[in-house]
Amino acid sequence: MSDDRVGNASMDLHHTLGQVRVVEVGAGRAVIEYLAGAHMCHSGGVVQGGFVCGWIDAAMAHAVMSETGAEVTPMSLELKVSFFAPAGPGPVFAEGWIERRGRSTAFVEGVLKTAAGAVLAKGSSTIRLMPRAQVEARARQQAE
């Protein structure tokens, strides 16, 4: 996949998830603001859980990338999310941080909060740290 297609796919993903901005990233932490739209909701104006998982997962991945750099791709091996309260339309903030990291694996946690700071969901993930070139080569092979 060309760098241009990778860049466009990344921008499409950010748009689909409703990303507004990366508020903070560095030193193994990340905060991303999303705008939950009515089109992301099911009955009663509740955001579908897949978006909540995606937001937390993205913040955790950004936290890992803040320490590993662009040459490493974080690949989720396991993802767990607990939902405490429903998210509705409006701004939400996903925060992610590294709890522990080795050479090839990171243990990461994250939360989703309202603009007022109420915790809506909490997640944890085990992430495999893969060389970016290897991940992209595998994706090219599968596309052929």
Image (cartoon, rainbow, N blue to C red):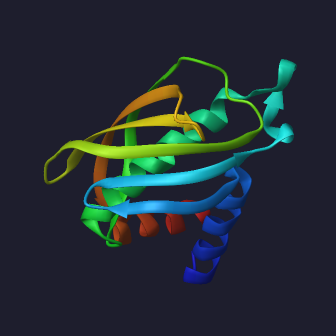
On the rendered structure, is 135 left or right of 45?
left
Give the position of the C terminus as an image quadrant.
bottom right
In the image, farthest residue toward the left: 102
- In the image, residue 127 above or below residue 43: below
The number of numbered badges drawn on the structure is 0
Q: Where is residue 54 in the image (x, y as percent from the top left)?
A: 57, 41
Q: Position of residue 56 (x, y in %)?
A: 50, 40
Is residue 135 visible to us here? Answer: yes
Foreground pick, 115 / 63: 115
Residue at image coords 26%, 64%:
68
Q: Position of residue 80 (x, y in %)?
A: 43, 26
On the rendered structure, is 51 left or right of 133?
right
Give the position of the N terminus as an image quadrant.
bottom right
Residue at image coords 85%, 19%:
44
Residue at image coords 59%, 62%:
21
**Res. 116 image quadrant:** top right
- In the image, residue 128 above or below residue 41: below
In the image, farthest residue toward the front: 116
Is residue 144 visible to us here? Answer: no
**Res. 63 image quadrant:** bottom left
Foreground pick, 97 / 124: 97
- In the image, residue 89 above or below residue 15: above
- In the image, residue 95 above or below residue 81: below
**Res. 131 image quadrant:** bottom left
Residue at image coords 60%, 64%:
143
